[in-house]
Image (cartoon, helix red, strand yellow):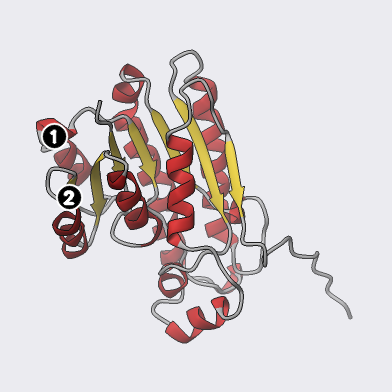
Amino acid sequence: MTRTALITGATSGFGAAAVRRFVAAGWRIIATGRRADRLQALVDELGADKVHAAAFDIRDEAALDAALDALPAAFRDIDLLVNNAGLALGTAPAQQASLDDWRTMIETNVLALVTVTRRLLPLLVERKGAIINIGSIAGSYPYPGGNTYGGTKAFVRQFSLGLRSDLHGTGVRVTDIEPGMAETEFTLVRTHGDQAASDKLYAGAQPMTADDIAEQIFYVATLPPHLNINRLEIMPVTQSFAGFQVARD
């Protein structure tokens, strides 16, 4: 039986890599994101029978509803939701940060994620499906400039655990995958297009790749149905835990 997944934020990074990984294994994928040209490129690459593109801003609740209502019959029986859409904006300390950036992160990483999840929960319960939320190690380990981004990812972790509790007995699995340093467009977005800053962060660090994370998403999704991984925290070997800060006179 062919299974179907809805993957948000599929235009780049983890999302695009996950689309390719699941299609390679025979899944049908609903790929969502804002950039219609990138979604169409996935359709052209992988086939319209395997990928359905739904271009909209994940923060737009009406657009989400319209996209779900417009799903072709072959893509309606969703077995897996991958809540991948999310972003970090800015690296400034809280007292200098942009409130607009904070609002965008909260709207995308929290409000949009819970809205998509709530919309699909009845179907996922019916089909004994699964939810994979893409969190971050930033939800567990604070660092300067992480402020609101880390807060949103801490929410994702706790929301995932809460879902597990509420969905007890339904057969629906819930996992929070928490990556560390991975080289994607993440830092480019965070720094509002500063390629030099992105290059500097990853230089010589042997960061994880989008394909590395896509493989873990696929692994979790294809475990036997009686197994649930609650949290999966992944770092490159070159990254470990930071020390405490001490301010001195």
- Circle 2 residues within 10 Å: few <14, some 14–19, many ≥20: many
Amino acid beneath label 2: Ala
Name the one closer to the observer, 47 or 13.
Answer: 47
Determine the CA span between mark 2 and mark 1: 13 Å
Quadrant of the image occupied by residue 10: bottom left
Name the one closer to the observer, 106 or 200.
Answer: 200
At x 10%, y 36%, the residue is 72
Q: Is residue 95 found left or right of 11 in the rendered image?
A: right
Query: Farthest bottom residue?
Result: 196
At x 54%, y 50%, the residue is 153
- Circle 1 residues within 10 Å: few <14, some 14–19, many ≥20: few
Q: Position of residue 231 (x, y in %)?
A: 59, 39
Labelled disc at residue 53? 2
At x 44%, y 18%, the residue is 171
196 lies above or below 121: below
Of the two numbered discs 2 and 1 on the same chain, state the one appearing first in sequence.
Answer: 2
Q: Is residue 55 found left or right of 163 in the rendered image?
A: left
* Residue for badge 1: 69
Name the one closer to the observer, 22 or 53.
Answer: 22
Q: Is residue 18 found left or right of 74 in the rendered image?
A: right
62 lies above or below 194: above
Badge 2 marks a residue whose secondary structure is strand
Identify the image quadrant of the C terminus.
bottom right
Q: Position of residue 205 (x, y in %)?
A: 61, 74
